[in-house]
Image: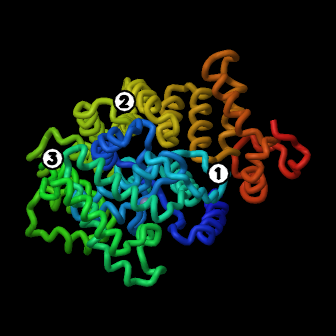
Amino acid sequence: MASKLLRAVAAVAATAMLAFSASAQSAIRDAEIEDTLREWTDPILDVAGLVPKDVQIIVLNDPTLNAYVANGQRIHLHTGLLIAAESPGQIKGVIGHEICHIACGHTVARLHAASVAMRPALVSIGLGILAIAAGEPGAGAALISSSSQFAALNFYVHTRAEESSADAAAVKYLSALGESPAGLVEFFENFRYQEVLSDARRYPYFRSHPLASDRIRTVRGLAEATGLMETPASPHVQKQYEMMRAKLIGFLDSPLKVRREYPPTDKSEPARYARAISAFQASDIQTALDATDTLLADEPDNPYFNELKGQILFESGRAAESVEPHKRSLELIPGQPLFLINYARSLNARGEEGDYQLAETALRDALVAEPDNAFAWAQLAITLENQDRRAEAQLATAESAYWVGDIVRANAFARRAVAALEKGTTTYRRADDILLITDANNPDNRQFYERYGRSSRLSLETGGRDMPFGDFSATARR
Ligand SMILES: [Zn+2]
């Protein structure tokens, strides 16, 4: 139900912002990719004088090459850029450039694309990349459709002068860290040919970041002056880059492309990783498991290999067996929110004595780190329901619906929770808060109720009948 409106919003956005691809996109959540990008980005943010925890990094599943800052301090990176980049330094260079757009006090021409329906800051659509499609069908569909909320963004449009200063700042940040700025220069030079393409065929990044040859010359001059051009990436960073790229290609590209990029003769770790994931994507479960086991034999303490094994087992219907590898991944990176959710989901599915209690603890920990994680709330609802704590489960469902922007459903479940929870408790107050912010009389929510009224009024099991539909024009904003 959300997608129709969002497509309309996206269409408006597309015409308003020729420079950007505004097609519906989904955010990708993956512990390894996020851990890697954070590890690379946080020191740059530090040097730029920003507080790392205030800056979000969002990876969007989009094969085009793009990176931008939008909706405040959020750096968006397309998977297309992460895959096309030929070195970690190229990605770091682009990130450094984007960081300056936040840190350098650029006056921003804000193109306000849409003000509504944008509530979820981050929508989980997968545990491991895109995994949800194979998981809980109901929750998955809702989460996936709402993830197109990324279509409408407040883009910042920068002047040429700001682009130059962002290039210079990226070089400065990296050299302050003792790292080579060569990646930024290489990235620009590799894509120089984009300049000869017509605007429509250009990657969005180069429509917004025109690569005039004087711009490349200037960056090269600045980069060479640092004397760090030949400084290689550390082996650790190089490996992170290769594994991240292998994972993205394994999950997102066709088996044919995976084979071309990583032919069977390539016995390297990234190649085996990409092939394991590709087999998993193609539902060749035994090949996927065997390949993952060979990776684990070499590196039993790799948290992401353990996660992959848990994911393959879970999604091939072997939930009970998936608990152990997920537990192991958590022992290796305690508190990793996405690992906590994986582990809880497996426990929920196994359902042995004590599993729901463990799942609840894991999910509550994950939700401290990511209170807006709709998928975690949905899993918590299952956990609570299985413990016969129906009212709390309804609140968790309301939270889940709220964070994917399903205002009507959030309201309906908050209403049920309020009716059943003990007055004055924290859970009661939260349910009451959700009831208030999702109120049909709030003009911000009007569109949700109107759409709901038109389409699926009867599909909501309860709570719908007494909701006022129709004319809200006389209702004042509270
Ligand atoms: Zn820029």
Q: Amino acid at mark 2?
A: Glu
Instruction: Provide the secondary structure element on which disc 1 rests.
Output: loop
Residue 307 shows in this picture? yes
Residue 278 shows in this picture? no
Q: Earlier in the sequence, mark 3 or mark 1?
A: 1
With 413 as the anchor, is 328 left or right in this view? left
Q: Which residue is mark 1?
A: 117
The structure residue drawn at horizontal position 13% and vertical position 53%, both measured from the top left corner, is 231
| Mark 3 residue crowding within 10 angstroms, few (<14) / some (14–19) / many (20+) | few
With 156 as the anchor, is 54 left or right in this view? left
Ligand 1 rendered quadrant? bottom left
The structure residue drawn at horizontal position 28% and vertical position 42%, both measured from the top left corner, is 39
Instruction: Provide the secondary structure element on which disc 2 rests.
Output: loop
Separation of marks 2 and 3 at Cα, in angstroms: 39 Å
Q: Which residue is mark 2?
A: 352
The quadrant of the image that shows the C terminus is: top right
Q: Which mark is residue 236?
A: 3
Pointers 1 and 2 in contact (C-beta within 8 Å): no
With 46 as the anchor, is 453 left or right in this view? right
Image location of residue 325, percent across then percent down? 24, 39
Q: Which mark is residue 58?
A: none
Q: Amino acid at mark 1?
A: Ala
Would the CB of label 2 be found within 8 Å of ligand 1?
no
